[in-house]
Image: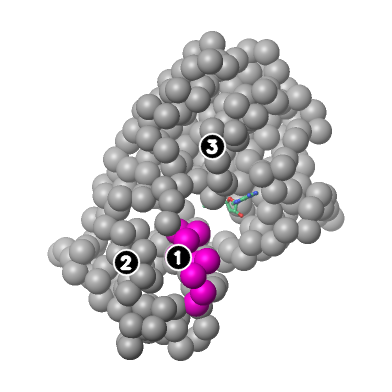
Amino acid sequence: MLPEVRQEKAVETYWVPGQYLKYETQRLRPALELIDRIPLASPRVIYDLGCGSGHITRFLAKRWSSCKVYGIDNSSQMLSEAVSEPSSVHWVNADICDWAPLETPDLIYSNAALHWVDNHFELFPRLINCLRHRGCLAVQMPLSWDLPSHRLMRDTLAKGGPDGRPFGDASLLSALSSRWVENADSYKEILLPCTQHLDIWETEYLHELQGDDPVFEWVRGSGLRPILNALDDADRDWFVKVYKKRLREAYPKGPGNRTLYPFRRLFIIALT
Ligand SMILES: C[S@@+](CC[C@H](N)C(=O)[O-])C[C@H]1O[C@@H](n2cnc3c(N)ncnc32)[C@H](O)[C@@H]1O
């Protein structure tokens, strides 16, 4: 029998796990590179915040097999996928914005999730304060704000429909109007006063994607999701047509149906 998902709060965000995992190999690599830098020998309690479909959470549970591992997410689609594969992980439907651990963690891990949560100046010290003494916060977030794919996304949305009519309501644009990840210096400033050791670095991956409109398919599984969910059918069709065309120009396909997608990511290991 599959384990139950404990429900802490009835907040919903709609994700399609299969679309997100279309580029699983490329998305998994930074998650594993982050795990490799965690300097804990035998943590007892681990929380994976924004665990999604749980493949990395299960990896954490195997790597530290005597540890209690919690997977936290607020998407029921992602959590349904997570529980579908038996594991020792405790899955919890909760919002990171007001999450507090049931047990004091040795490790809080979060891959490609905290950029969905606002106000990192409040969030990061709060997460550090949850940790046990000599605990670790390990975070990876995409630095996607300035990428052509994401600039074109905002720009196409701002330009509106065929007659210049705005798409959806103004709140959609304003939700996308502020940078979701701060620069590395800001995390240094936030974390230096409340940690014993910090390791912050950036890596740019040159993802090789196969097939037609691969950059569109990539963002459709992640950053584009709130826009597609918010538009009505006619607006969505128009938006997708224009945006795909602009993406093809920005990311031309190379030989063998391969497209290179440069993608920068920020990594943080903070020790208390
Ligand atoms: C891009 S996926 C990453 C999933 C997983 N960490 C991975 O690397 O495969 C981001 C996940 O964060 C979750 N998420 C976003 N905002 C959240 C919030 N406020 N509270 C809980 N989970 C959240 C989403 O539901 C989604 O499953």
The residue singled out by tag 2 in the image is 155
Residue 240 located left or right of residue 77: left
List x then y, in percent, for residue 6. 82, 50
| Quadrant where the image shows the N terminus | bottom right
List x then y, in percent, for residue 32. 47, 36
Query: Disc 2, ligand 1: is the CB inside 8 Å?
Result: no
Q: Give the range drawn in magenta.
A: 168-176
The residue singled out by tag 1 in the image is 173
Give the main secondary structure, helix, strand or loop, of the magenta stretch: helix
- In terms of image quadrants, where is residue 247? bottom left
Q: Earlier in the sequence, mark 1 or mark 2?
A: 2
Residue occupying image coordinates x 54% and y 37%: 120
Residue occupying image coordinates x 66% and y 44%: 97
Question: How far apart are labels 1 and 2 at the CA level?
Answer: 10 Å
Residue 177 located left or right of residue 57: left
Residue occupying image coordinates x 43% and y 51%: 178
Residue 44 located left or right of residue 260: right
The residue singled out by tag 3 in the image is 120
Which kind of residue does numbered mark 3 sit on? His
Is residue 171 on the magenta stretch?
Answer: yes
List x then y, in percent, for residue 238. 37, 84
* Of residues 59 and 110, the one drawn nearer to the viewer in this rendering: 110
Q: Earlier in the sequence, mark 3 or mark 2?
A: 3
Question: How far apart are labels 3 and 1 at the CA level?
Answer: 21 Å
Give the secondary structure at mark 1: helix
The residue carrying pointer 2 sits among few (fewer than 14), some (14 to 19) or many (20 or more) residues within 10 Å by Cα, namely: few
Give the secondary structure at mark 2: helix
